[in-house]
Image: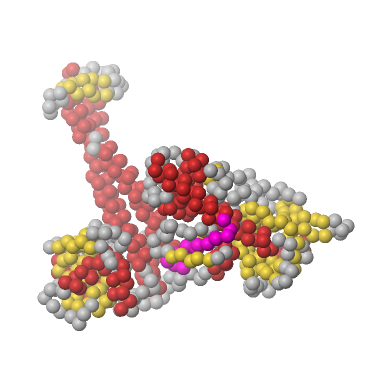
Amino acid sequence: MNLEGITLYTQTAYLKQEITGSRIYKIGMPSNHSLYFSLKRELDVIHLMIDVNGGSPVIYTSAKTPENPPEPPAFCMLLRKHLEEGIITQIQQYGLDRVIELEISLLGRSRQIITKQIIIELTGKNANLIFVENGIILDSIKHVSPVMNSVRVIQPGYAYNPPPLQTGLNILTASPEAIVAAIPDEVTSSLWKQLVNATTGIGKASALQLLSAASIPLNATYLTPTDRRRLASAIAGLQNAVTDTAAQTFTAIVSKSNLCQTVFPFHVSYIPDGCRTELFPTMNEALCFAALLQPAKLPDQELLQKAVLAEIRKAEKKIVALQQDLIHSNEADTCRIMADSLMASLYQVKKGCVCCTVPNIYDGTALQIPLSPVLTPAENAQKYYKKYNKLKRAQEEVAIQLAETTDMLTYLESVEESLHLATSRQETEEITEELQKAGIMPVPKRKMHPSGKSSPVRIVFSDSTTIYIGKNNRQNEEVTFKIGTGSDFWLHVQKIPGSHVLIKTSLPEPEPEALEAAVQLAVWFSKARGGSQIPVDCVPRRFVKKPSGAKPGFVIFTNQKTYYATPDEEYIKKLLQNNGIK
């Protein structure tokens, strides 16, 4: 989960109200990266939960006490010695940064009040909890040595230095017009990055929400005057939503794998694909929900997605580089023309010249040729012949590599779509095995026992017609080449990663309703799901072939007819539910 400054701004206000003045009577460490304080208030007991796990750092209050290990860690014992019976006298956030400080006051030996601090840095992978007295670190959950970071050392005995201050305008107090004015009209990178750089307190998630609320495309690279007015209005709306405590609503964005991505102190206007929202009356309830949310039981799905996306980015960069190389290699013919023209005019060229102008033997025009003064005219001609041969070989090699990389990119995009469609352990295991065979994922030394093969989606449309849909490349090949026969009808979206769809019917031709449903399903189970008027190719199964040595799921076909469809979400979901498919 990614926390933003405005999220912690709201949570800090809640904690000030709920736990200021409470007394610490118990401290526990359920794990190496989590800690809790049991606090006595006037009428009850509450537990302050702090987790500095780099994946999802969080702070919230709970009525339940977590289980503790049999032996408390040394850090826990140190806090018990110094902080038990202490009073939380102050809670503050460092600006709009993701850092919260708890000030704890205790009565010293000579009846003097001693003040110590617990500093909670909820800064993603660098999250930490640091125990400080008089500006000196007594200890922390995570140590950062001078070797790891020479600027900011976090070890006992060192002075505490807070994270570097963020630069930019305060998203809650600055004028919306001033914030918008800090963004250039046209940017080379994404617009949301410019909005984040110009402000403090928000990250990518809130920046995308602001662009969506202003009806600005999320991939926009420029701002029109109308865009600027709408964006200023959206920022003003965010400021009112966060600071108006009377009617606040808190929204959690939950991913398909049932993990909380982030929590907003306002209503959202943009929900990422495959995500859902949950609403809460307080920020604390939202963060508590996020911390206790159990992920969906799809092992390694997110790991696979990261690996595939990384390979896609590498392939895209390689294609750009190869295209540049191909343009450069196209100079081969120019080198040959220079060499031939120079050989035909050797008597006109003297050694020591750095350039000469000779007739082009192919069209008669004047041709200017750079020369090396240390070489004879004949040697210069031979140099151009060598360069021609080198570029010609490179041209062929680059063309081959470009075709191979383009095929790999198409394959990776099909695997990425399969991961979006995976809903069972067997399906993710099959994709893992496929990526291992392709050399994208490492093969484990100890082979795991497979949990069985997954089955393609099967929709009984009528007594005479059944529709089959493959959700990954193994299922696609099963649908096409094992279930399908020559008289069946095969469908696939045109030039877009998606599922193989098969209409198996005992009729000479499929019913029009079944064909229409299959076309919609082909779009629904593809990367074009949210589009309209998507072309779908339909062809008798006998015209679908798999080339020798082709990657899993790759086929070629002829004699197709093309249909266009915009999927009806309500109709498709009802069709799937009637067949017991989630």
Instruction: Provide residue 580's location: percent of width, then percent of height.
Output: 33, 79
Asked whether residue 252 is drawn in magenta, I would say yes
Residue in front for this viewpoint, 186 or 1: 186
- Residue placed furthest toward the bottom: 463
Identify the residue at image location x=12%, y=63%.
559
Residue in front for this viewpoint, 222 or 370: 222
Q: Is residue 8 left or right of residue 551?
A: right
Magenta stretch in the rendered image = 244-261
Instruction: Provide residue 67's location: percent of width, then percent of height.
Output: 64, 74
Q: Tell me if I can see residue 315 in this picture.
A: yes
Vertical side of 75 occupied by 481: above or below = below
User: Number of numbered discs present?
Assistant: 0
Q: Is residue 234 left or right of residue 84?
A: left
- Residue placed furthest toward the right: 110
Identify the residue at image location x=20%, y=73%.
514
Q: Is residue 361 left or right of residue 470?
A: left
Vertical side of 35 occupied by 404: above or below = above
Instruction: Provide residue 32's location: percent of width, then percent of height.
Output: 63, 64
User: Which quadrant holds residue 507?
Assistant: bottom left
User: Which quadrant holds residue 275?
Assistant: bottom left
Identify the residue at image location x=23%, y=77%.
461
Asked whether residue 255 is drawn in magenta, I would say yes
Identify the residue at image location x=68%, y=74%.
70
Q: Tell me if I can see residue 500 in this picture.
A: no
Instruction: Provide residue 557's location: percent of width, then percent of height.
Output: 17, 62
Residue in front for this viewpoint, 470 or 259: 259
Q: Is residue 242 left or right of residue 475?
A: right
